[in-house]
Every structure is written in structure tokens, then in C-alpha cells.
Image (tube, rainbow, N blue to C red):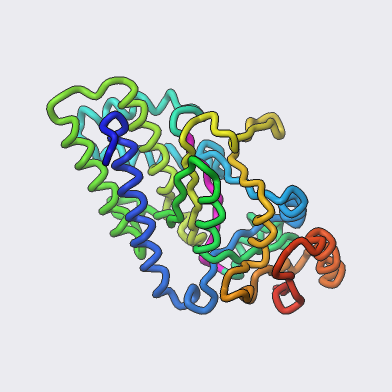
Amino acid sequence: MMNMNNFIRDIFIEKFDNYGKEASEIITKNPIFQRQGQLYHYTSLGSIEAMIKAQSIRASSIYSMNDPNELTFGQEQLSNRFSQKLSTKLKQEYSHQSFYNFPAFVFSLSELPDDMHQWDKYGDQHKGIRIGFTPKNLLEYWSKIDGVNVFLVPVVYHDNGSKFLEPYGEVFSKMIKEFISNTESHYSDREMDYPELNELKTICSLISSMIKRIEWSGEKEWRIICIPSGSYHKNIHGNFQNGKSNVYIENRTFDTLKMFTNDGHDNVASKDILKIGCNAGDKNQIEYILSLLFDKKVIMTVSQSEIQTR
């Protein structure tokens, strides 16, 4: 039963969940995905060391993304699809964004198993590592946090005209069309009060964060989206780095170590899990360091056949 006091959030979660499921069906037809069944996270060796030592993975706030224009571009595209009255109100409210009120957190991945741009930008300029995850493992891992809605969805890219690019553009367009239609219909006979407008603004900010310019389309990005039940969820933390605030949600669990072996395929880890950048250093030394970090705590250990160099 949908809670009428949280209508906007509830209808969004329903539509967003459908979007993730439909997009997952689409990617299963992708030849690259069919070969390995994985999505990939590029990072530095220092970052994976920190994750393994802390036995945790972090997802960053949607207000801390790497493209400073990411939210504003998507907000413009999305708000224009509402009625003029509601569109005007939304645009006025966007200037009051904050980390609070319906926070959402992102863990980014790519469909690309060995991409030069990913290695350069996210893989520490080819000195880092690329980790393969299966969608099932990712969803199960993040869903173990109590009080968090978890989605695995692709980013969509806009052609700077009026269309979202395929293969996910059509299902994304359907999702936002249904969300907007349901919202407009629900409030057709009364004014939206300020808490409701604020909730709509923050949900639209989350949807907007999934919209990128066509220039980013080569990244073929997917995201784990974590939406906790409140702004002060016990797994939300923050700190300051280089003069900037950093807010994130963290899953600290022994199961983190299993994620780096991609365990769960009939007790056999999938191949091509870890790939080391070409400028990372000596492969044998890195394998030895990683084995020390794992410290025999992983049920399915990583063997040389699963650690590759590009």
C-alpha cells in the first residue's frame, strides 16, 4: 500500500525500480556483457588497499560527482518536461540544494572491461586496478544495509536536442514520463505544499544526476544508487578532503572481501575479475601485496588466472 504522505517518493521508487529491471534485460543482449556478465569499477591501488583493509566499499553523494555541471544539465532537461507552473517552482528550488532531505549515494561502474579513457581518468592514469562485479552480487551486497533502497541503473546520455541516446534512452524516457504524469495527476486538484515540493526537487535532482551530456557517452556508465531511509542513517559518514566536504554511505562488512573475488557463481569466481594497469608496476609484487591484504580471509581466493595486466 502506497503511503499517501510520501506519494512522490513512493511513485519514484516504483518507477525507478522498473527502469533498473528493464535496463538489466537490455544489457543481457550486449555481446561484451554476455562474455563476462560483469560491470567494471576502475580505481587506484591505494583505494582498493583501503577498501580491503577496512573491509568496506563507499558510495558518494550525488552532490559530489566528478562533472560539476552534471546536476544542472539534467535538471534543466527534466524540469522542462513538467507543466509550466511546476517547472517554474522546481527551477526556483534548485538553488537551495543540500546534502539533506532524501540523500542518495552513487557507486559508479562501466560496461567497458578495458577502456583507455577509464584507465586514464579513474584508474590512476593506468597505474591502478579494474575490478569486475556481477550485477547480482552488487545488488545483494548493498541491499544488506538496513533501511536502504538499492538500484542498479545505467546513466543516460542526452543528444543536446530532445532525445536520450539508446540503448537505454527509451526506457528512461518512459520512466520519467510516467513519474511526471503520476505526480501531475496526483496534485491536479490542490497545491503542492513546501515539504512535498522539496521532496520533488530532491528526487528530480537524483533523476537529473543520471542524465549526462553526449560527450560523456563513451563511458557507458552504470550506477549503484543507494537511497537511505533518512538523512542521518547510521551508515552515512562525512569528512573534509582538500578543503571540500565528502559525504558518503559505507557498507562495512566481511562480505566486502568476497566482492573482490566476485564469488557466487556456483562457488566459482568469474574470470577476469582484477586487471592491473600497464603502469602499475611489477605484476608479481602487486599479486603478493594483494594476497597479504586479503590475509586469507576470503573464502574464494584470487589466483593468478584472475589477476591480469593490460
Q: Which quadrant holds residue 13?
A: top left
> Residue at horizontal 49%, vertical 58%?
221
Magenta-span inclusion, residue 166? no
Magenta-span inclusion, residue 105? yes
> Residue at horizontal 51%, vertical 51%?
143
Q: Which quadrant holds residue 167?
A: bottom left
Q: Residue 200 placed where, x, y %?
A: 33, 32
Nearer the observer, 237 or 158: 237
Where are the magenta residues, as a range? 103-112
Q: Is residue 124 rendered to the left or right of residue 88? A: right
Residue lying farthest to the left in this orientation = 189
Nearer the observer, 113 or 58: 58
Q: Which quadrant holds residue 248?
A: top right
Q: Is residue 309 visible?
A: no
Q: Quadrant of the N terminus?
A: top left
Q: Quadrant of the C terminus?
A: bottom right
Give the dominant element type of the magenta stretch: helix, strand or loop.
strand
Q: Is residue 61 rendered to the left or right of residue 6? A: right
> Residue at horizontal 46%, vertical 55%?
152
Nearer the observer, 244 or 26: 26
> Residue at horizontal 14%, vertical 30%?
188
Q: Is residue 129 above or below residue 226?
A: below
Q: Is residue 218 visible?
A: yes
Q: Residue 63 placed where, x, y %?
A: 52, 36
Q: Residue 149 placed where, x, y %?
A: 45, 45
Residue lying farthest to the top in this orientation = 194
